[in-house]
Amino acid sequence: MELAFEEVCNRFNLFLQRVYNRNGDNQKGLIVMDESKHELPLQALARNFRLNGARWGHFRHLAEVPFFVDSRASRIVQLAGLVAWSTWRRYEHSDGRFFDPLIEKFDADGGVIHGLYHARGSTSTPCYCPACLTRQQRDGRA
């Protein structure tokens, strides 16, 4: 959970950094999450990131610790849940029916999908999922 949360924070921060670099638009972002048993540990982790930084430094474009809301009251959080579920189905069950139409909506720049990350234990076996493939193409390995 901590690694996934750090990845979300980092990727969102980098997205906002690219927007700033491209347009000079210095927006700060908010992360809104569904209420869960992970709320307190993730808020503590976010505070730690704010004070001490993370593996990639400080997240300068995040305005606040994450906000937690009941997804039953928020359609946008329900939509995020559907995106997460369709991504899980694609990676865990090789079922892209719901994921494939969404892939072009993930944050991408220069042909690399930044808004999707595939954490793999072994990098010796090639992976042809959209996240890995765009990085391999960028690095000239595909």
Image (cartoon, rainbow, N blue to C red):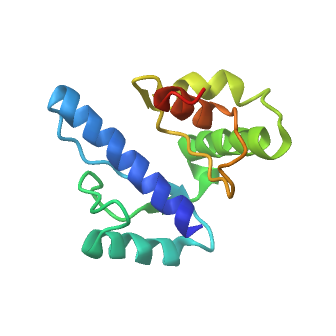
Q: Position of residue 86 (x, y in %)?
A: 72, 38
Work out whether residue 38 or residue 45 is closer to the camera in this orientation and state it: 45
Q: Position of residue 115 (x, y in %)?
A: 49, 39
Residue positioned 23% across, 56% down in the render: 60
Q: Write down the quadrant of residue 97 in the picture.
A: top right
Image height check: is 37 above or below 55? below
Residue positioned 53% across, 72% down in the render: 39
Work out whether residue 75 or residue 94 is closer to the camera in this orientation and state it: 94
Residue positioned 68% across, 48% down in the render: 124
How many marks on residues? 0
Q: Residue 31: in sight, yes or no?
A: no
Q: Position of residue 16 (x, y in %)?
A: 30, 41
Work out whether residue 16 or residue 27 is closer to the camera in this orientation and state it: 16
Question: Going by the picture, which residue comes out furthest to the left?
Answer: 24
Is residue 89 left or right of 49 when viewed as pictured? right
Q: Position of residue 66 (x, y in %)?
A: 42, 62
Image height check: is 89 above or below 22? below
Is residue 65 left or right of 27 when viewed as pictured? right
Is residue 61 left or right of 66 when viewed as pictured? left
Work out whether residue 100 or residue 82 is closer to the camera in this orientation and state it: 100
Q: Write down the quadrant of residue 64 in the picture.
A: bottom left
User: Quadrant location of the N terminus?
Assistant: bottom right
